[in-house]
Image (cartoon, helix red, strand yellow):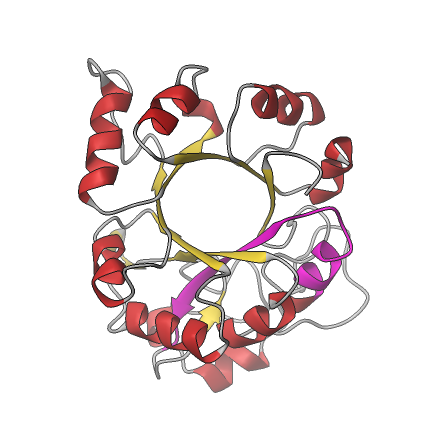
Amino acid sequence: MTSSVQRVAHRGGSHLAPENTRAAFRNALTLPIDAIECDVHMSRDGHAIVFHDYTVDKLTNGHGNILDLDFAYLRSLEVAAHSRGGWPEPQQIPILREVLDLARGHVQVYIEIKPSKRDGRYGHYPYIVEAVLEEVRSAGMLDQVLIISFDWTVLPHIKSIEPALPTGALVSKDSWNAGQSDAFDILVSQASALGCNWVNMDRDLFTPSMPAIAHQHGFKLGVWTVNNRKELQRLAALGVDSLTSDRPDLFTIFS
């Protein structure tokens, strides 16, 4: 790294290539990044797949909730079907191991464990934590991965199985009341109780005092999703530890 801030390609750089595809991750590896970020769901038959949405309708040429779909069907879908500006070659939904294999020895991997969702209600994929950890172990990448989630209940579960594996609490306005008194101090206390190493904030919730407070309590602070050159520079100067962007090509400003 030539910068003190870790540069993270969000979904592989979703403004540059079809998100969460091998094409996106390969493209990200040609850019000045330190990590790729990917989202993990589970197929009905127990495969850890890299995909963001709860249903496949928006991003592919298929239909249905991932809860109801087997891997063979998911693998048959065209992920670049609705890609902005098109894409010159078909793309399949990757399994987590394929993404880990691309990154191994090159960059860190932020793995976001997703909850399931049906009819507006969130749930849990059975054994998703165990499946993700098995893939990370099998790839020999326990020292190259950060696991993050909006579902904070999975974070202590991860620590109970792999205590040394770094975890981070994803924070949005849906999961945190920024208006309450001493809000960030309370958040840091919650993250500590969860055994986290990172707090990863929505950029719209960030305030300049946060890095110092996080660091005082032994946490690293990440900010997502930042797609503006000046904002990247401003946040880096304020002392955040990672910046996640859909435009990893902008990280050339730190080179």
Residue 162, quarter of picture? bottom left
162 with respect to 142 (left or right): left
- Residue 165 versus residue 29: which sits nearer the camera? 165
Report the side of 52 relative to 196 (left or right). right
**Picture quadrant where residue 22 is located:** bottom right
Q: Can residue 242 be seen in this view?
A: yes
Q: Which residue is drawn at 19% across and 13% down?
A: 181
Residues in magenta, as a range: 23-43
The residue closer to the viewer here, 213 or 233, is 213
Q: Position of residue 105 (x, y in %)?
A: 63, 66
**Residue 211 spot, x, y in % from top left:** 43, 23
Q: Can residue 93 be seen in this view?
A: no
Residue 230 image-quadrant placement: top right
Residue at 27% in and 68% down = 125
Q: Which residue is drawn at 54% across and 19% down?
A: 238
5 lies left or right of 252: left
Seen in the picture, residue 254 relative to 146 is either above or below; the reply is above
User: Which of these two is toward me, 10 or 158?
Assistant: 158
Quadrant of the image for the N terminus? top right
Q: How many marks?
A: 0
Residue 233: x and y in percent read: 66, 23
Magenta span contains residue 39 = yes
